[in-house]
Image (cartoon, rainbow, N blue to C red):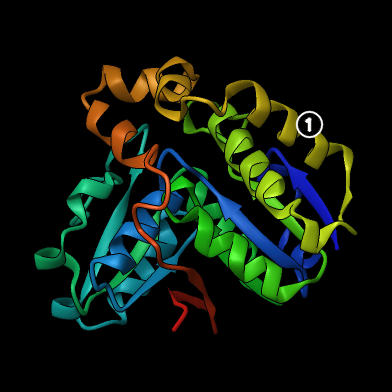
Amino acid sequence: MKIDVSFSANHFDELQLRDKNIVVIDVLRASTTTIAALAQGAREIIPVANIESAVKISGSLFGEVTLRGGERSGKMIEGFNLGNSPLEYTEATVKGKSIIYCTTNGSVAMSKSRYARNLLIAGFVNMSAVVQSLKELNNDFLILCAGHSGTSGNFSLEDAVCAGMIVTRLQKPELLSLELTDGARAAQALYKSFGRSILKMMKTTDHGKYLVEIGYAGDLEICSGIDTMPVLPQLSGTVIKLKK
């Protein structure tokens, strides 16, 4: 099993990701919010790359069963139903709903991966479910870190540390034949340096500090939890649903 880690989705287009096994990480906050929404009973997440696509798709779906969620500069997009805080995606709000989802980086990485052979959505909150699924897959895969929205897809420490945790947890005796690229080894080294306190690390990162500034300190606590949402979002057709 060969593991590669890319620290930005900017380097890829849909053709380069076609038929690959992909894990998308955007800890703060798109992947965590996707996991939370589906854990709270959302029917599906429909990731889009831009606001125009979100508006176009929502025009063709039934209004009462469809919500639009996402952010620009960390804040809810005008005319949308929800922002990008996992705390907003409660069971009362999202159960049974399709969510058209548009964020600066996370939904872009998901949208680029829509022709992947397998696409999993990962965060700290569903770490064990992701690792177990990758063990069962037992095939080469790419971890795609979405990057943070402050600089539109640039390096994000919290995503890299999360990727490193996946790599480290896969390196158990039953999977000694792992082949790690330089990116995977770098992610693992960052996890070993910063993984002892995930919340403390997040409070020092560029995007973590920005979210605290604009009033989302509570999101860091949610996003730093380990295995608090033991579900696995995966690509199903062109949408993201929970693995049964």
> In the image, 1: left or right of 80?
right
> In the image, 239: left or right of 185?
left
* Residue 209, image quadrant: top left
Residue 198: x percent and y percent?
Answer: 46, 29
> In the image, 113: left or right of 243?
right
> In the image, 121: left or right of 38?
right
Residue lying at 33% horizontally and 32% vertically, measured from the top left:
220
Residue lying at 41% horizontally and 52% vertically, measured from the top left:
227
**Rendered position, 234 above or below 192:** below
Residue 126: x percent and y percent?
Answer: 45, 56
Circle 1 is placed at which residue position? 186
The quadrant of the rendering that contains the N terminus is bottom right
Residue type, label 1: Ala
Residue lying at 29% horizontally and 56% vertically, measured from the top left:
69
* Residue 81, image quadrant: bottom left
Residue 195: x percent and y percent?
Answer: 56, 29
Q: Name the outermost residue toward the left.
A: 92
